[in-house]
Image (spheres, rainbow, N blue to C red):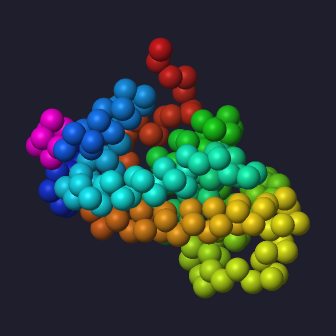
Amino acid sequence: MTTPISRFPLPESIQDLPEDLRDAMLAVQEKAGFVPNVFLMLAHRPDEFRAFFAYHDALMERESDTLTKAEKEMIVVATSARNHCLYCVVAHGALVRIYSKDPLLADQVAVNHRVAGLSERHRVMLDFAFYSGLEVGELTNEWQTRLLEVGFTQEDIWDIGAIAAFFGMSNRLVTLAGTPPNEEFYLMGRVPRDS
């Protein structure tokens, strides 16, 4: 018995999708070896799929001033754990392990970044991500000073807040749909990849 990946309609086949959605899924499948469930879950609304992944890529793929890919994924994991989003914790936890080359970091960040052996930079970054994604989110003088003092730029501050906000929405969508993480994500960055 297989677990359903959405309470909403799914494509009968990737071949039935608009060409751009199909191409996006096939490109990810070629790189990762599978199609992440979130792609299939969002495919029932092609315009929203396009908007979601355009903003995702604008945030997560752009070169930030000092924010690394591993740090961006740490923000996703920490805030997704607070939002009780299993899909994003597992999927983006895999990316934390891969980008950081640290098999323990994603789990530490997901459970409690404040007791993990993180740098002051990372603690402040994740504290601000919680504040901006889960609380009021106003960039006060105090927050700005704290972030600048640990080496972030003004543009990095935007990125931290925007990633936390965007993944708050993502967390809610996969939770709404009941979308589980692909099994493949659980082992990524933990065991060597087959060649």
> Quick one: 116 or 79, which is closer to the camera?
79
Q: How many numbered marks appear?
A: 0
Left or right: where 39 falls relative to 158: left
Residue 78 locus on image (x, y percent): 60, 61
* Residue at figure coordinates x 44%, y 40% from the top left: 185
* Residue at figure coordinates x 43%, y 28% from the top left: 31
> Do we see residue 75 in this rendering?
yes
Residue 135 locus on image (x, y percent): 59, 82
Residue bounds of the magenta highlight:
11-17
The picture quadrant where one finds residue 179 is bottom left
Residue 107 locus on image (x, y percent): 61, 50
Q: Is residue 14 above or below residue 37?
A: above
Q: Is residue 161 above or below residue 54?
A: below
> Do we see residue 84 in this rendering?
no
* Residue at figure coordinates x 55%, y 46% from the top left: 61
Left or right: where 60 falls relative to 67: left
**In the orientation shown, which residue stands out farthest toward the top?**
195
Residue 145 locus on image (x, y percent): 85, 74
Q: Is residue 182 above or below residue 78?
A: above
> Quick one: 174 or 24, which is closer to the camera?
24
Left or right: where 44 falls relative to 150: left
